Amino acid sequence: MSREVSVATLRQIGGNGVANAAARKRRLAVTSEGRRPGWVSYTILTVVILISVFPLYYAVSIASQATTDTQYGVPALRPGSGLFRNLSTAFGEIDFLTALGGTVLVSAVCAASTVLFSTLAGYSFAKLRFRGRGPLLFFVIGTMAIPTQLAVVPLYIMMARLHLFGTLWAVMIPGLVTAFGVFWMTQYLEGALPFELIEAARVDGASMIRTFWSVALPAARPAAAMLALFTFVAQWTNYYWPMLILGPNKNAMLTVAAAALKGARFTDYTLVMSGVVLTAFPLIVVFFFAGRQLVSGIMAGAVKG
Amino acid sequence: MTATPVAPDKPQQSPRPAHDATLERRLRARGRRGRLDVRLSPYLYISPFFLLFLVTGLFPLGFTAWVATRQWNTITGDGGVAVCGATCGTTDPSVLANFQWVLHQPAFWDALRNSFSIFLISTIPQIVAALVLAAILDANLKAKTFWRMGVLLPYVIAPSAAAIIFSQIFSDQSGLINTFLGWVGISPVPWHANTLASHIAIASIVNFRWTGYNTLIFLAAMQAIPRDVFEASVVDGAGRVRQFLSVTIPMLRPTLIFVIITSTIGGLQIFDEPQMFTQGTSGYGGPNRQFLTVSLYLWDLGFNHVSIGQPNLGRSAAVAWLLFLIVVVFAIVNFLLTRRIASAGGAHATKSRTKEVAR
């Protein structure tokens, strides 16, 4: 029975009047359409959201202090008046615009590349039959267990040999494809794209690539959007690899710039925290506007296997 | 032209006039092209991924194994087969020398213990909390999107940035937590100096970032469970807790396995949080290695440590391989355990249902 049917059932029960009130109540208690959460649920959620927001508030609060001796003073729970002065100092010190530009570029290129190639491969694995399909897919999923650290040493040597050390290329290249992306798209397309649709397109005379372009790609859109956002966020918040490969070029990306500020000015916590606020802020703004899609995207592209 | 991409050798097109040679030739050419199209396309579509993956994923894998047997310096490059030296009392070059050297280091064992400790303190509460939160969010809440977004918010904060913030909150001298503990009459906890306390603090950074993410993954899977299963369980007299344990959890099995395994893989590789948790400049897991993790140790050996030993990428690579083996063993153990736990509560009917949903 699908969810729609159970809604209809509920309506029907509702229509039968007072006699069925007890049964209706019982039924309402189970289904998500009817289960009215009590104050306990709302209290738990409120606490969770306060915990989610608090560290950010605290960072802003420290960043706004006028003095630099917050380390030994009373914790800054109330914002001070120095926020803009501190932010502009940090803005100059980490060359914010360069770092932002580098981060946007790397995140966008990696997201675009991962989505395109994962959708292509995922479509093949989910809907086309070819020799070696099973083992290859198994192999892709198996490689998801490989820690990133395993590739760090050789990638470092490779990038140095290619004279890419310290460049954004070196940051970007290892993130162009992910095994997770292929797994994700395969999972999604297996469920979301009926064979009949592909067959219909083929009968109508569409070539393989045309079928992919006008049938598979539109069907993959919710999961592709999701994957794009995941990849984008993952690259944006990535620190380990950029820190290693950017070397002295520390202002090329936001996470590395914020960490470098901490390394250089660790006694001046108002400034360090201003740097953290500055570097976290752009993605929070994006989240504020795209969060709705992000959330509904997770719901659409649920990992089912 | 073939009818379906699944079976390339479907009957040819509709009857055609035998006398029209040009048309026939054209149709045959088209059919041939179509068959080739069908046969080659799948490989064409997976090849960009595999080519890039070969360069950035597979080749490095083999290369790490090679580097792990050598003495390899960031400055001077390959220096021949590795030698263990005084640590293990032999100066003979050996392909296993780097592994031997690493296994002789107390720091490695400290790092391993810390990684496990932080991983356990973070993963278990995180997954339990995510499951409960998902169950709450699965109900018919007012302002659903608001709650979901709020729960997911920490996900967009970089772990390194979160670690800097939490390092202040958990500051030993006058951090927020210690000040608060002072108010209620508890003496300050040395969050950076004490081993277990630092693990708890670091685990809380991990939990801060990932609980909401896992919650939404669970929530998505919960919403895919057919509602009549719940109704049936109520008819059978199950309460809400019983329903959660005997219906929801078993039905979530595939997702549960997925989340637990990805958390394991990520959890054993923790780097950003301990590196940035340090107060001061040295990013090396605390003065007494209280929160040195395996990843941090790997980085320090190969890229950070400047002393007589010089940064040694070979030893770093050996640590990477040891970490890989541990992760694989853990992923397998986890998989088997989770499968058992998740299926213990489910009836046969539910199990077959799960497969249906999981397809």
Image (cartoon, rainbow, N blue to C red):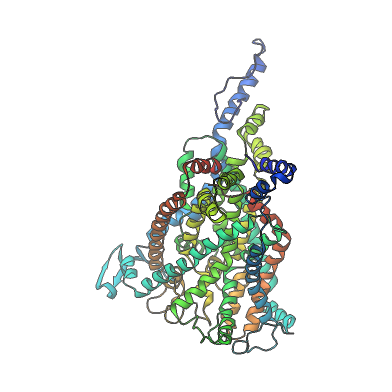
Judge by depth and name the residue closer to the eye, A245 or B104: B104
Q: Quadrant of residue A3?
A: top right
Can you say whether B50 is above or below A206 in the image?
below
Q: Is residue B309 left or right of residue B346?
A: left
Q: As drawn, which residue projects farthest toward the front?
A: A19
Residue at the spot x=59%, y=32% of the render?
Answer: B37
Judge by depth and name the residue closer to the eye, B31 or B25: B31
Can you say whether A23 is above or below A150 in the image?
above
Asked if residue A156 can be seen in this view, the reply is: no
Q: Quadrant of residue A218?
A: top right
Q: As drawn, which residue projects farthest toward the top?
A: B19
Q: Position of residue A26 (x, y in %)?
A: 64, 49
Number of labels in the image equals 0
Residue at the spot x=64%, y=62% of the render?
Answer: A41
Q: Position of residue B126 (x, y in %)?
A: 53, 64
Q: Quadrant of residue A176?
A: bottom right
Q: Is residue A147 left or right of residue B49?
A: left
Q: Position of residue A255 (x, y in %)?
A: 60, 70
**Which image quadrant: the N terminus of chain A?**
top right
Q: Is residue B173 left or right of residue A87?
A: left
Asked if residue A115 can be seen in this view, the reply is: yes
Q: Position of residue A70 (x, y in %)?
A: 63, 87
Residue at the spot x=71%, y=63% of the render?
Answer: A286
Judge by depth and name the residue closer to the eye, A179 or A69: A69
